[in-house]
Amino acid sequence: MSTTFQIPTMAEKTAAGDQPEILFWVGCAGSFDERYKAVTIAFVKILNKLEINFAVLGEEETCTGDPARRAGNEFLFQMQAMSNIQVLNGYQVKKIVTACPHCFNTLKNEYPELGGNYEVLHHSQFLQQLIHAGQVVLKGGGGFKGKKITFHDSCFLGRANNVYEAPREIIEALDMELVEMKRCRSKGLCCGAGGAQMFKEPEAGKKDINIERTEEALATGAKTIAVGCPFCLTMISDGVKNKEKENEVKVLDLAELIANDLGLNS
Amino acid sequence: MSILPQLLFLTLLVASGVVLYRRITFLRNTILLGKSESRTDNPSQRWKTMALIAFGQQKMFKRVGPAILHLLIYVAFIVINIEVLEFVIDGISGSHRIFAPALGGVYTVAMNIFEWLAIAVLVSCVAFLIRRNITRVPRLTMPELRGWPALDANLILWIEIVLMLAILTMNATDQLLAERGVAGYIPLGGLIFSSVLAPLFDGFGDGALVITERIAWWFHIVGILAFAIYVTYSKHLHIFLAFSNTWFSNLKPKGEMKNMKEITNEVKLMLGVPTQGVEEPPAEVGRFGAKDVNDLSWVNIMNAFACTECGRCTAECPANITGKKLSPRKIMMDTRDRAEEVSKSIANGGPGLEDGKTLLGDYITKEEINACTSCNACVEACPINIDPLDIILQLRRYVAMEESASPAQWNVMFQNIETSFAPWKFAPTDRFKWADEIKGKPMND
């Protein structure tokens, strides 16, 4: 067992003749976004701690094409998809875990028709499985036990793919008090970033969507807002800053909550 | 006895049948303006979806109040139609309450159930009128409903109220006549609800009573025939199309966008990926994405005609909630109106699609489609599985690929993906730099 954190690439694994159990698809936000890199690192720490045989694509990973497709550029989407599929199939990848619901949705639902067939899990589902299997034993530590938390459903996880329970089971395992927003689960309100909105200013209106959603989250009285999506994390964090609550209210990804609980946060 | 009424009835029945047939043919042709799309896989799942969502009203019950009122009207519609069968037989054969003698007490029970349902319809319709016009529920008073849609909605409610009053009047006068022993009228031994109306007609002579009863009977059946035709011009078409609409539902995960096969072939050629199997000859190279209704699928257009403009989609739409122009309901109404316009023009030998107008531009603006977050709230909210998002995304495809007129920031995002393989402008070689922070660092326990 290694005593240092390892982040092997598929290329390294293949060269060593090892077929990893899972490919961790990091995603563009997970690779480049200053805030979301912390989520990537938290998840990698969990994988290391649990001695899971994983690998990443490293520099061989590229955008899944999701934002291009939602913005209408099907050519660009398919170019991205097809070249990613060539790489994934080249490494004979069977199972992918990702912390981004947009990557998750695209890899799981949209790659098969283009020749990419994998078992794809969102990291919340993967972590849920590990908790069920007893591989992750949460102490309810990390200073969260019994504290109020609310969960913001990502549209691409929830309505798009009917994943509502996995994130909630993680929160339950952390022994925190989940306070639902009025619009939750299938009625969850979007953070405002889906459909490639992340990459442009909103149209003219009377309010920004992330402010509307943040107000609802703050109204629960929870001091932790949990998310499972890089775009939601950005939008809700911006909303909390806009409301000048960033010192009292934390917006955290599910992987960060678990990493904190496991004492992997230093 | 004169057979004139029977002849008149038969003429009306046949005439309305002919009009209905022509309207249904027109609607069918209009829906088939759309491109073909196969939605017949997994029939057992499709029947189940239809049974739960259309027949069982499952998704209506997300809002319990309106759901109960709606359910009463829906059940009444189905059950009272059994009575219409008797009306039609009586009308053709010149009989009166033909089922009564054979069914005896059961007939009286059935009539009381029908009357109870008629009262329930009255109450529900009045409640709906109040919600629309007095308490003004926001989703029922939005700008896209101005004019005909608002009138249509109110007309439907008033027509239903009047039809139910006709039934109750008919039963009340019919039973008064039966009590007085007038020939041809059958005593049913107590109709609970219409008997409340009886005192209103007590002072009438037998002749006046017979005339009132006949007027009510004719009014009701002619009203129903006329309403059946009206429905084909109205948002009320949902009473039929809800069933086909749910049967042809999208059974795939909501997040999955339809693949454009015509592009797949080109991309494969560009990347040098061997294309397997027999290459389908490229069918007529149409547009990429949708600019007008004929670029959409027939399912999109059927969706549009099935829409009853309830606005649950718009009430859940994050863009609309925060004051953007997008309203998923308007997307459906525009699609329907444009399809109808084109179809009417074709039927009249006009220019059809070549009338200088298009769905995108003349009906739906870019500002609307650009505001969509593709969050699927509208799709989830629709009680009969209409999919406004599918139309929005097809329109965006047209804008992006045929016009290159996406918002400037999206064009930048496209460029970033093309050159840096990420939607933001970062060097691809920096993609794995995040690992430097922890790689090789000691695990702390």
Image (spheres, rainbow, N blue to C red):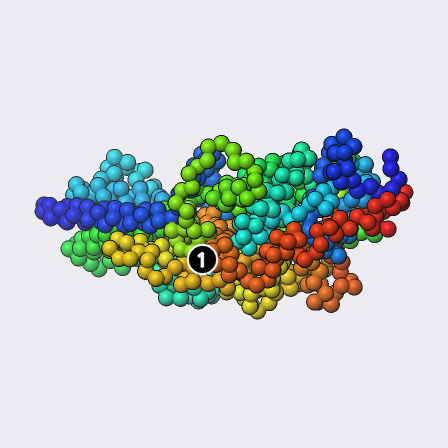
The chain letter under disc 1 is: B
In the displayed structure image, the side of residue B1 where residue B170 appears, left or right: right
Query: In the rendered image, is residue A56 in sight?
Result: yes
**Which of A112/A213 is in front?**
A112
**Which of B152/B417 is in front?**
B417
The spot of residue B247 in percent (x, y) is 43, 40
In the displayed structure image, the side of residue A223 where residue A78 appears, left or right: left
The residue located at (46%, 35%) in the rendering is B279
Q: Name the outermost residue toward the top.
A: A17
The residue located at (89%, 40%) in the rendering is A3
Query: In the rendered image, is residue B132 in sight?
Result: no
**Which of A174/B415 is in front?**
B415
The spot of residue B425 in percent (x, y) is 68, 57
The type of residue carrying mark 1 is: Ile
The residue located at (43%, 51%) in the rendering is B287
The spot of residue B240 in percent (x, y) is 36, 46
**Which of B68/A214 is in front?**
A214
In the displayed structure image, the side of residue B178 where residue A155 appears, left or right: right
Q: Name the outermost residue toward the left.
A: B2
* Residue B408 against residue B15 in the figure, above or below: below
Which quadrant of the figure contains the C terminus of chain B? top right
Q: Secondary structure at mark 1?
A: helix
Q: Residues within 10 Å of mark 1 (few under 14, many from 20)?
A: many
The residue located at (20%, 43%) in the rendering is B90
Which quadrant of the figure contains the N terminus of chain B? top left
The tally of labels here is 1
* Residue A9 against residue B322 in the figure, above or below: above
Identify the image quadrant of residue A134. Answer: top right
| Residue beneath disc 1 | B331
The spot of residue B326 in percent (x, y) is 50, 61
